[in-house]
Image (spheres, helix red, strand yellow):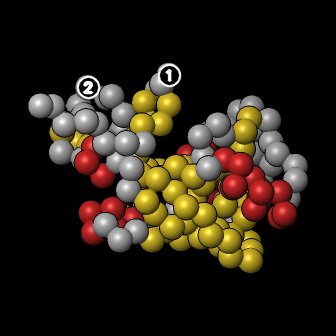
C-alpha cells in the first residue's frame, strides 16, 4: 500500500474489455450518446489517498443486470464478484456499481449512478482491477518489485 496524495491515480476500479461490453449493450440499444467512454470501468475509489498496487491485475467477474439511458448518460448496472478479500471489501462500499457507456456533450460520467436502470437479461464479463492515470490510461498490472 502506498500513499497517493500526489494524485497519481485519478481512480481505481475494474476495467472491462470495451468490445465485449459493447457486444452486450448493442443487443439492448444500439444508439450511443455524443461521447463514448474509452476505458469502460467500475470506479471503486475516486482520487484515492492510498493505493494497493499489489491488487492490480486481479480478475473479477462482472454481471450486467440493468440498463439505463436518460439522454444525458447511458450505462449498465452491474454486480461484481472477486475471490480477493480486499477487493471484495471495496466492492461492498460501492453504492451503485455501474459502468458508464456514453454521455452527452454536457454530462459527467459520475451522474450515471442516478439512472433508472431497467432489468436486463444477465450477461457476464471478465474484468481486471487497476488504476487510471490521467493522460496515460489504465494501469492493469502490479509494478515490478525493486531488486
The answer to whether 123 appears left or right of 2 in the picture is: right
68 vs 14, left or right, is: right
Query: Which label was assigned to residue 6?
Result: 2
Relative to 37, is 26 above or below? below
Q: Secondary structure at mark 2?
A: loop
- Please state which of residues 45 and 25 is positioned toward the viewer in this rendering: 25
Asked whether 124 or 93 is in front, the reply is 124
**Residue 99 shows in the view:** yes
Q: State how far apart marks 1 and 2 are (Cα).
A: 15 Å
Residue 104 position within the rendered picture, expressed as x and y whole percent measured from the top left: 76, 38
Residue drawn at point x = 61 percent, y = 58 percent:
114
Q: What residue is shown at x 31% (from left), y 29% (from top)?
A: 7
Going 72% across and 39% down the picture, which residue do you hit? 36
Viewer-nearest of labels 1 and 2?
1
Q: Quadrant of residue 88?
A: bottom left
Q: Which mark is residue 135?
A: 1
Amino acid at each position: 500500500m502506498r500513499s497517493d496524495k500526489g494524485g497519481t491515480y485519478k481512480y481505481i476500479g475494474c476495467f472491462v474489455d470495451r468490445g465485449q461490453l459493447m457486444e452486450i449493450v448493442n443487443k439492448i440499444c444500439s444508439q450511443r450518446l455524443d461521447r463514448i467512454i474509452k476505458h469502460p470501468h467500475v470506479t471503486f475509489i475516486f482520487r484515492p489517498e492510498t493505493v494497493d498496487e499489489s491488487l492490480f491485475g486481479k480478475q473479477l467477474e462482472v454481471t450486467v443486470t440493468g440498463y439505463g439511458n436518460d439522454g444525458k448518460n447511458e450505462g449498465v448496472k452491474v454486480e461484481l464478484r472477486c475471490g480477493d478479500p480486499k477487493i471484495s471489501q471495496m466492492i461492498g462500499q460501492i453504492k451503485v456499481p455501474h459502468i458508464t457507456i456514453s454521455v452527452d456533450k454536457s454530462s459527467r460520467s459520475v451522474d450515471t449512478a442516478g439512472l433508472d436502470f431497467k432489468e436486463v437479461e444477465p450477461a457476464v464479463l471478465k474484468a481486471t482491477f487497476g488504476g487510471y492515470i490521467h493522460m496515460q490510461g489504465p494501469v492493469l498490472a502490479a509494478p515490478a518489485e525493486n531488486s
